[in-house]
Amino acid sequence: EEDEVKRTLIQFLTQLKGQQNNNSTLLWKLDTDPCKDQWNGVICDAQMSIKRLDLYRFNLSGNLDVALLCNSQPLAASLTFLSLDDNNISGGIASEIGNCKQLTRIHLSGNQLAGNLPASLATLNNLKRLDLSNNKFSGPLPNLDRISGLNMFLAQNNDFSENIPAFYFSNFDKFNVSFNNFSGLIPDVQGYFSADSFLGNPGLCGYPLQKNCSSQIQRSTSSKISDEEKSKGPSKEQILIYSGYAALGVIIILFVVLKLCIGKKRGKKIEAESNGDIEKTSYVSRESKSEEASKSGFSVSSENGMVSQQSLIVLARPVVNELKMEDLLRAPAEMIGRGKNGSLYKVMLTNGIVVVVKRIKDWSISSVEFKQRMQLLNQAKHPHVLSPLAFYVSKQEKLLVYEYQQNGSLFKLLHGKSKTFDWTSRLGIASSIAEALAFMHQELGQHGIIHGNMKSSNILLNNNMEPFISEYGTMPKDDHQQSSTFATPIANDAFKGDVYGFGVILLELLTGKLVKNDGIDLTDWVQSVVREEWTGEVFDRSLLKEYASEERMVNMLQVAIRCVNRSLEARPSMNQVVLMINTIKDEEEKSLIYQV
Ligand SMILES: Nc1ncnc2c1ncn2[C@@H]1O[C@H](COP(=O)(O)OP(=O)(O)OP(=O)(O)O)[C@@H](O)[C@H]1O
């Protein structure tokens, strides 16, 4: 299978390279490994699956053969990202793209790609970002509104035609179809996009363009009708069908009128019999509403104190498909935490799924910004970061719904009663969390989103004891920070706060000690012990008992100490931390092989 994947990739990449391109740096060879030997533009995950093909500005002038790529089952099952931006590639998008179901991003901008888009594009349910701009694509757009998570669609400077289908514009942060050949009425953009997104399409009309639609559409429809009328009058069959419809219409109207008369008579009778009852019923239902709300331990209120009608926005459809606010309010719940930035409830839904609802306190972020933040968090998915399943936002309330993690937090595991937590597992957790945090910094740093509250109670463990960073990007910031940081690149210092938090988690993993113990701060204590050259005293006794390698523990301690350095500049970036920890992990793995 590995050989087949390699062969397919080489064929795909060689076709992309084209005849003229003799760029010898693009070495994709059968006797090497795409992941281990780091083929140009091929990016793999820790499990050595090919995740990304990033060939942006590779000076490629060949042909795009998506069918080849997506007909390879292992590649189709792993590939999440395809970027060929700014090359000189020709060809089109074959319908086999629909097999590459894991794709979240497709970037094909700035090439010579042409032809119609296949309908199968609309079956890529995980797709978030699609950039087809600056190519020669033509024909109508498929109905991409079926992809609920799509939040970027760029198709400017092509030759697309016909109507623009409706999209969920409120989900989008970028949308551009300017300079094409679209025609007809622009769908309702709900104020999310300006005329710039639609300019340069002569046949397009309506808001946000300054071109009134009614006259144009009326003209075209009336000319169509008169053309049809001119071409032929109604046939005999048509006259028969129309008169049939008319007769049916008369019967329906008679039936409705009859029903109305009977209903009115009955209504009058009931009203006369029980005059005060209507008042009573509406009062009871209001009361039962508030009863329902309090059942779950939390209720959602709007300005006028009533249960809000705004709905829950579901992000992870397969897990909590169709979850509604009423389901949350009705389900039995138990409060499991009350921190400085909100309370946490464990909620048992009627379908057996257990979720956790975080109610965020005192965060003066606007609803629009909060929604944008949720969308960005939902895009930046990492296998070791717990993404919200759904959220609710109003002026008064901000709720986040997460999947409940059976095995609790790393804090509980380290400091709770059961202490069967060996060195290899600790190393595995450190490495997974470091990779996840580095990934999130890279994906969301440019939007000013960091974790902001890295600590062992925010590292959760699932059934298989796999770790997850929870509550990423949900930490309210001070107001003065708030207005200045959101949606703008943030200073390096903010990342370094997360690096510090991660360093403290490493110290907890190495020492098994609490962050604050009898007023003594763990970082101060570790640093003082190391200064006195009693480093061995630092480590958790259970690690020493299992004869874990002291050399590797010392190396890890050095990483932790660098992360908690008082000077922000002296702290490494999370990418550097990942490299250091993975070197230690590699050494550990090699030593285990030798032991076997
Ligand atoms: N999705 C979840 N599944 C299982 N346990 C969770 C989940 N989310 C949080 N917890 C646990 O619930 C407890 C309370 O969490 P909460 O977030 O309220 O407090 P905290 O993490 O201790 O502090 P902070 O408010 O600063 O985040 C913690 O022990 C946390 O590990």
Image (tube, grey):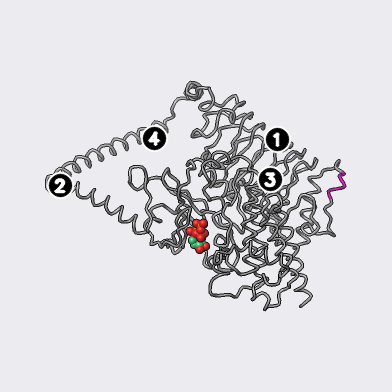
Residue at numbered disc 3: 94
Q: According to the image, label 2 marks what residue?
A: 276
The residue that appears at 60% across and 75% down in the rendered structure is 420
Q: Is residue 25 magenta?
A: yes
Q: Which residue is mark 4?
A: 241
**Measured from the top left, where is residue 12 in percent x and y?**
77, 50
For badge 3, the amino acid type reads Ala
* Earlier-in-chain disc, 1 versus 3: 3
The Cα–Cα distance between marks 1 and 2, rounded to whole angstroms, is 70 Å
**Label 1 belongs to which residue?**
135
Q: Of helix, strand and loop, which one carries label 4?
A: helix
Q: Quadrant of the C terminus?
A: bottom right
Q: Is residue 151 above or below residue 185?
A: below
Q: Position of residue 211 (x, y in %)?
A: 53, 22
Of labels 2 and 3, the one closer to you = 2
Question: Magenta residues, as a range?
Answer: 22-26
> Quick one: SS at disc 2?
loop
Give the x, y percent position of residue 468: 59, 60
Mark 1 Cα within 10 Å, few/some/many (few <14, many 20+)?
many
